[in-house]
Amino acid sequence: EAGVTQFPSHSVIEKGQTVTLRCDPISGHDNLYWYRRVMGKEIKFLLHFVKESKQDESGMPNNRFLAERTGGTYSTLKVQPAELEDSGVYFCASSQGWNRGLRTEAFFGQGTRLTVV
Amino acid sequence: AQSVAQPEDQVNVAEGNPLTVKCTYSVSGNPYLFWYVQYPNRGLQFLLKYITGDNLVKGSYGFEAEFNKSQTSFHLKKPSALVSDSALYFCAVRSRGNNLFFGTGTRLTVIP
């Protein structure tokens, strides 16, 4: 079974440009999460999809970030226009949600390292 | 509000020695605690979790963690470290909304 996959693995863009990150969750996982780790700091939650709906987007830093999950399958995270402080590693994770009355753990992708210069 | 603290940025241990990676938490309500590991050029991998039940939780690769409610700690342990255990370890607590609050990470280096 394929895990969570993210594209690209690395991206270097200039300030002011646009970048789109993609996440393919594990098949059948309704829950999809985006997280970000800025260098040396904690991994911070950005937002949570349940199927195609945004369940919680309280962690999105500002309106330069737009996440979509059309059809409830893969998700994209667009940064437009990118700023220097957007540099970091963006992780995507997915989970089933519930299993025998317990919430299941999330499985993470390898991350996309974004560098804004 | 939920939060996690990992007081050590770096832990060095000799191969074969026991290792401990520290984590303390702050939550309102029952804590749901996790450990994840990130090997070089890899994603975060789930190691173990505490939801309820026994305070000693066993996970992947021989790791275990002890939940201590009075000390609000969830330290990760392994009786005998391997060089291949060298990686970045993250402690996390789950919010009511099911997203995770992570610590800043601890880099473990096992010295041959």
Image (tube, rainbow, N blue to C red):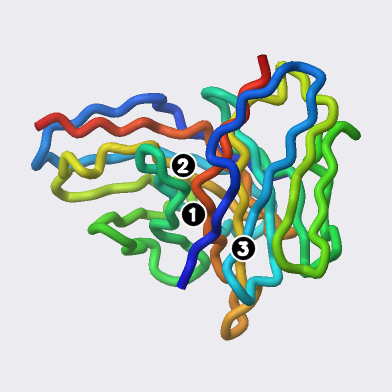
Q: Earlier in the sequence, mark 1 or mark 2?
A: 1
Same subunit under labels 1 and 2?
A: yes
Q: Quadrant of the C terminus of chain A?
A: top right
Badge 3: residue crowd in 10 Å (few <14, some 14–19, many ≥20): many
Q: Amino acid at mark 1?
A: Phe
Q: Which residue is mark 3?
A: A25
Chain bearing tag 1 is B
For image coordinates 57% across by 68% down, the residue present is A26
Q: What is the tally of numbered marks visible in this picture?
A: 3
Residue A71 picture quarter? bottom right
Distance (Cα) linking label 3 and label 2: 21 Å
For image coordinates 41% across by 60% down, the residue present is B48
**Circle 2 SS class:** strand
Q: Amino acid at mark 3?
A: Pro
Q: Position of residue B25 (x, y in %)?
A: 55, 43
Judge from the rendering whether residue B73 lies leftward or rightward of residue A31; answer left or right: left
Which callout, 1 or 3, points to the residue nearer the camera? 3
Distance (Cα) linking label 1 and label 3: 20 Å
Q: Nearer the viewer, residue A8 or B31?
A: A8
Q: Which residue is mark 1?
A: B34
Chain bearing tag 2 is B
Q: Amino acid at mark 2?
A: Phe
Q: Label for residue B90?
A: 2
**Circle 3 SS class:** loop
In the rendered image, the vertical position of residue B26 relative to residue B28, given as above or below: above
Same subunit under labels 3 and 2?
A: no
Q: Position of residue B79 (x, y in %)?
A: 17, 50
Judge from the rendering whether residue B72 lies leftward or rightward of residue B82; answer left or right: right
Distance (Cα) linking label 1 and label 2: 8 Å
In the rendered image, the vertical position of residue A116 relative to residue A73, given as above or below: above
